[in-house]
Amino acid sequence: MIKMYTTSWCGDCHVTKAFLTKFSIPFEEINIEQDPQAAEYVMQINGGRRSVPTLEYNGDATSLSNFSRSKLDAFLQKHQLLQSS
């Protein structure tokens, strides 16, 4: 299952959640404002930035800050979670 690191105020997080939900792609949402360890992890993998949303699947993580549908699609296809068009 995808882990999605978010904040409550993040517009890109809302867009990403809507996309994953629309295509029935399961995910676990982890709010970094409520989980200091998750915030540290996000900063560690994003060069010291609290970049959200950050998606992780099987140890591979990527930031989708400044949301790009093509970047999300590439991440999902890489892990065979979305069929290519």
Image: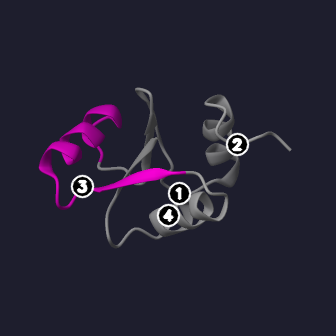
For mark 3, what is the residue? 32
User: Which label sits on residue 82?
Assistant: 2
Q: What range is drawn magenta here?
A: 26-49
Residues marked 1 and 3 touching at CB (< 8 Å): no
Asked if residue 40 is among those painted magenta in the image, a careful observer would answer: yes
Is 50 rendered above or below residue 14?
A: above
In the picture provided, is 14 more to the left or to the right than 41? right
Instruction: Name the amino acid, label 3.
Output: Ile
Q: Earlier in the sequence, mark 4 or mark 3?
A: 4
Judged by depth in the image, the label closer to the viewer, 4 or 1, is 4
For mark 1, what is the residue? 66
In the picture provided, is 63 more to the left or to the right than 42? right
Instruction: Name the amino acid, label 2.
Output: Leu
User: Which label sits on residue 12?
Assistant: 4
Residues marked 2 and 4 touching at CB (< 8 Å): no
Real-space Cα separation, disc 2 to disc 3, in angstroms: 26 Å
Residues marked 4 and 3 touching at CB (< 8 Å): no
Is 42 rendered above or below residue 18?
A: above
